[in-house]
Amino acid sequence: MLNVHTIPAFKDNYLWLIHQANSLDAYVVDPGCGQSVIDYLATTELNLVGIIITHHHSDHTGGIKQLQQYFNQRLNVYGPSNERIDGLTHPLTITSSENIDIPHLGLTQVMAVPGHTLGHIAYYIEDKLFCGDTLFSGGCGRLFEGTATQMLQSLTKLANLPDQTQVFCAHEYTQSNLDFALHVTPNN
């Protein structure tokens, strides 16, 4: 069973520390702030063994270098191969969806979800989706590089996951997304 710990960072980022229930070896998803991860780990018995990246924006990758230095470069760093991300040790070339075995986590479905960025990927582990900036409560990510068509296709792909899927997005935008929706469609 996959355990998920929430590490708040910056104003509205969520970093996710994940590990199997029978293991103390953990990965962090999208560590924009390395110090937040280091501080959180100091309160647990967990050992950071890797990093999982969804896309290249600095609020998702800014902590990679600090974490690699702190842990003496021994971290496995997974992320999209077609984005500009320093420090990747396991660049992933995903064109649609593929299953990979991530040590200490197990079988992971990695999906291409372009829209927010062209190389954006999401990770589906057991019944948990780590989707970066593709999907939020009440909305989706802004289009920085991709098109609306790409985002729609990505959201459709995510909508086809099982109903029991738990979504772990990278920001807390619920209130602002719902305020926007109310403004745009006040009678909905």
Image: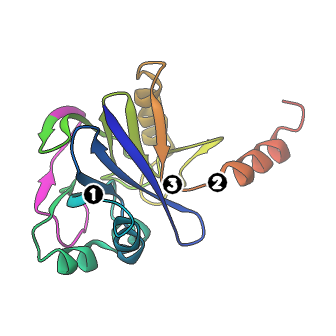
In the displayed structure image, the side of residue 139 where residue 107 appears, left or right: left
Q: Which residue is mark 1?
A: 46
Q: Nearer the viewer, residue 179 or 75?
A: 75
Classify mark 2: residues with Cα within 10 Å, few (<14), some (14-19) or many (20+). Answer: some
User: What is the magenta range?
Assistant: 82-99
Q: Which residue is mark 3?
A: 143
Residue at 60% in and 70% down: 11
Label whose residue precedes the other's in the sequence (2 or 3): 3
Label whose residue precedes the other's in the sequence (1 or 3): 1
Classify mark 1: residues with Cα within 10 Å, few (<14), some (14-19) or many (20+). Answer: some
Classify mark 3: residues with Cα within 10 Å, few (<14), some (14-19) or many (20+). Answer: some
Amino acid type, callout 3: Leu
**Where does residue 48 sit, x and y in percent of width and height?**
23, 61
In the displayed structure image, the side of residue 17 where residue 177 appears, left or right: right
**Where does residue 56 sit, x and y in percent of width and height?**
33, 64
| Circles 2, 3 touching at the beta carbon (< 8 Å) | no
* Residue 88 magenta: yes
Per the image, label 3 sits on a secondary structure element best described as: loop
In the displayed structure image, the side of residue 123 where residue 149 appears, left or right: right
Q: Where's the N terminus, which quadrant?
A: top left
Query: Which disc, if any, is residue 173?
Result: 2
